[in-house]
Each structure stands twice: as structure tokens, then as C-alpha cells.
Amino acid sequence: MSQPVTSRRTPVAEWGERLGLPILLAVIVLFFSVFPASSRAFFSVANLTIVLANQSIIMLVAIALMFPLIAGHFDFSVGAMTVLAAVVCAGTNAQMGLPIAVSILLAIGVGLAVGLANGVLVARLGLNSFVSTLGAATLIGGLIQWYTAGQAIIGIDPALLQFGSRQWLGVPRVLFIVIVVGFAAWYILGHTPFGRSLYAIGSNPRSADLVGLPRMRYTLFAFAMSGLIAGIAGVALTARTGGANPDGGTFLLFPALAAVFLGATAIIPGRFNVVGTVIGVLFVAVSVSGLTLAGAQSWVDAVFNGAALIIAVFVSSVLRKRRAGS
């Protein structure tokens, strides 16, 4: 009986697949740098600083999203958890007079608690993550509206506001939080038995059970990590905005989702990874910034994010199937 013929991709094709998104990002940067309508402001230090500072929050939210996704679950409450943490941080400091350090710890603790609650619902009780986290996001949004009465919270400690608005060595300070969190996530996911096990659980839960991996415990930990990082993102959001705005967090969720799935098409195609996710965030942010400076209408942001998410989900799914087949 003849054996099936398997096609082998050349090293050039493999590297092209890995570096496709970074190359496309470089092309977009070059285009808007020379395009007459955007060239003057696009490649300026001020615009670069603003993009990096504003996208630091999206990067943190995207990294938070990665942990449940790698385990095979969605977490649609990440954006809401981030806003909730911001409300807790700003509210306890500006309205209750607690020291800023205590407010920061409370905000991160609230994110961790909500993440653990999501993990219990999904891992222990077996609820569908799509539905349960969407319900959690809706519940959190309602609680935020109740506490804030639809009004922004301002008047936080100037030290935190200065941290969010100033720079170190020409780099926005909040970006250093992303570097620390991103490095920790990269190490945990790529260089520890837990990270490798989490990938195994997400790719084939049944096989993971057969080899004895503690799927329930690891899934719970994945949601806890998501909540912890969302709490950190909430503190960074408070520092950037100088307070907290009553919002459901969708302005954070969908760009982060697009970035995570775009990231799964690069560096390690078909696999969620930290470096690819950061590149995905920059790709979306740079594209939207360039289009805005070129005179595009306000609706372009939402259209671009939605289109990027759809395309990224499709491409990453194809790459993931190809990876599983190989």
C-alpha cells in the first residue's frame, strides 16, 4: 500500500510565516512615515510616546487573555476586571482616603479574586467559559455603574498620576510594567513545566487527562493569572487616566482579542505567544494611529479592530490545525 505524501515547507517559507506580521508592521510604519498626509506627525517622538503609553494597557489585557486561551477557554471578563480594578484603586484612594499602596494592592487583589471566581465556575463547576465570563463581565459592568453612579472618579494620589504620565529614559513609565509582566508570562508559558502543560491541556484536553495532567487545577490557575494581570492593568489604567471611568471594558477587550489572535499568526504560528501578542498590539495601534493622522473618520478604529479580529481568528485557526496535523 502506498504511503500518503506529506509536503514539507522550506525554511524560507517557515521563517516567512513566523516573521510575516513583524514585516507587515515594519511596512505599515514605513508607509505612514512617508505618506504625505501623515508623515509629519506619525514618526514623531511625541506620537510614538503616546502610542506606546496608551497601548501599554492593551498589552497587559492581551497578556491576561492569553492564559485562559492557551488552556482552551475564553475570558470575556478581562476588560471589565481591568476597569473594576481601576475603580477600586481610584475609589479607595480618592474617596476613602486610603494610602495609594493599599489601594493598589486592593485593586490587584480584586482582579485576582474575580479571576479565581471565573476559574471555579469553569474548572470546578464545568460551566461554559464563553457564557460564564460574558455573564461576569455584564455583572461587573453593572456593579461599576452602581458604585460610580455613572460618574468618573478623580483626585487620586499625584504620585500615581505622575507615574502614569511621565517617562524614564525617554520611555513611558507604564511600559516598564508591561516589560516585567510580559517577561514573567513569557518565562512561565515557555520555560516551565506548568506552561508546557497548559499548552498541552488547551490543544488536547482528553490526552492531557490520559497522561495525568491536573487539568482542573491548571485551568483554575490560568483564570487566576488572567485576573491578577487584569488587576495590574487596572492600576496602570488609573495611573494613565488619573482616575477611573465607569465603563464595561469593551474598549479594552476587543483590541486585546485582536492582538492575541494576530499574535498567534507570528513568531510561533498557530500558538498563542507573548512576543507575537505584543507585536499584534503594535500592529493594530500603529495602523489605527496612521489612519487617524491621515484623516480617516472616527469609525475606522472600530472597523479596523473588528476586521483584524476576524482575519486573525481565521488565520490562527488555519495555522493551529496545520500545526496539529504536523
Image (cartoon, rainbow, N blue to C red):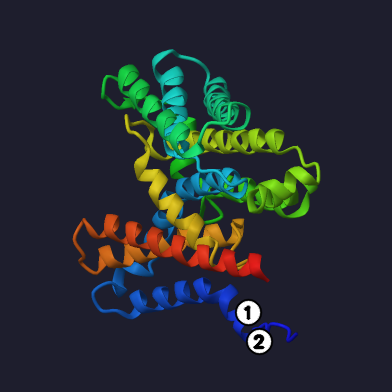
The answer to whether 68 appears left or right of 95 in the picture is: right
| Residue 35 % position (x, y) | 29, 79
Q: Which mark is residue 203?
A: none
The quadrant in which residue 79 appears is top left
Image quarter hosting the N terminus: bottom right
Per the image, the residue denoted by label 1 is 14
Q: Classify residue 17 as left or right of residue 37.
A: right
Which of the two residues, 203 or 89, is positioned nearer the viewer here? 203
- Report crowding for label 2: few under 14, some 14 to 19, many 20 or more residues within 10 A (C-alpha): few
Q: Which type of secondary structure does the marked residue at label 1 adopt?
A: helix
Task: Please state the horizontal and vertical placement of residue 309, each as a whole percent of the image.
Answer: 40, 58
Q: Amino acid at mark 1?
A: Glu
| Image disc number at residue 10 | 2
Q: In the picture, residue 218 is in which quadrant?
A: top right
Question: Disc 1 vs disc 2: Cβ atoms closer than 8 Å?
Answer: yes
| Total marks placed | 2
Q: Amino acid at mark 2?
A: Thr
Residue 279 appearing in the image: no
What separation in Å lies between label 1 and label 2 (alpha carbons)?
6 Å
User: From the viewer's perspective, is 230 left or right of 209?
Assistant: left
Residue at the (56%, 55%) spot, across then down: 169
The residue depicted at 55 percent of the width and 62 percent of the height is: 264
Image location of residue 177, percent across then percent down: 58, 44
